[in-house]
Image (cartoon, rainbow, N blue to C red):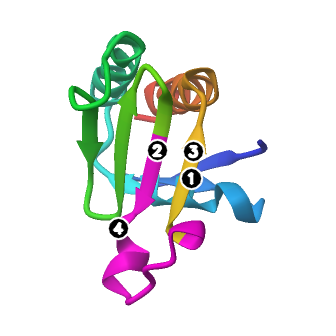
Amino acid sequence: MEYSFKNNDDWFIVNVDEGKFQILNRFTFYGWTSTKVQEIINGIEASKEKPKGEEYRWANEDVLVIANKNGILLIDMMSQRGGVHDPDKITLTLTHKELLTFLEDFKTFVAENS
């Protein structure tokens, strides 16, 4: 999975070109701090032991992250609001390692550009 980050004033922009992973672009948001990203990282780390029904959840207006010991599910809330309801188009499953690597890289970028 390849991605890059940009910042524009208070906006932190995520760029993922690979179609399967484009839902990660929904992390583009204003006002990110490395502390906010770390809170999500902590939740994902803790979710590694959580059973189904006790998931860690985080969301902004555009993406919902659900994590438990089975892995990570991301739901594209923006596409859903736009009328897309096909699960193959609005969801992405990742391993804990995949999302944590992305979030650690994002946190570093936010810290360096805040």
Residue 64 on the magenta span: no
Q: Tell me if mark 2 has few (under 14), some (14-19) or many (20+) residues whose alpha carbon lies within 10 angstroms of its own.
A: some
Query: Which numbered dot is residue 93?
Result: 3
Q: Are marks 1 and 3 in contact (CB under 8 Å)?
A: yes
The kind of residue tagged 2 is Leu
Task: Name the residue beneath numbered marker 1.
Answer: 92
Task: Name the residue beneath numbered marker 2.
Answer: 73
Q: Are marks 2 and 3 in contact (CB under 8 Å)?
A: yes
Residue 112 appears left or right of 63: right
Residue 109: percent from left, percent from top:
55, 31
Residue 54 appears left or right of 100: left
Quarter occupied by residue 53: top left
Q: Nearer the viewer, mark 4 or mark 1?
A: 1
Q: Nearer the viewer, mark 3 or mark 4?
A: 3
Q: Is residue 30 above or below residue 66?
A: below
Q: Is residue 113 above or below residue 34?
A: below
- Pick the front one: 105 or 63: 63
Quarter of the image where the N terminus is located: top right
Residue 102 appears left or right of 11: right
Residue 81: percent from left, percent from top:
31, 82
Give how far apart the Cα atoms at labels 2 and 1 are: 6 Å
Task: Name the residue beneath numbered marker 4.
Answer: 77
- Quick one: label 2 or label 1, which is nearer the N terminus? 2
Q: Are marks 3 and 4 in contact (CB under 8 Å)?
A: no
- Pick the front one: 89 or 1: 89
Q: Is residue 13 visible?
A: yes
- Quick one: label 3 or label 4, which is nearer the N terminus? 4
Q: Which residues are magenta?
A: 73-89
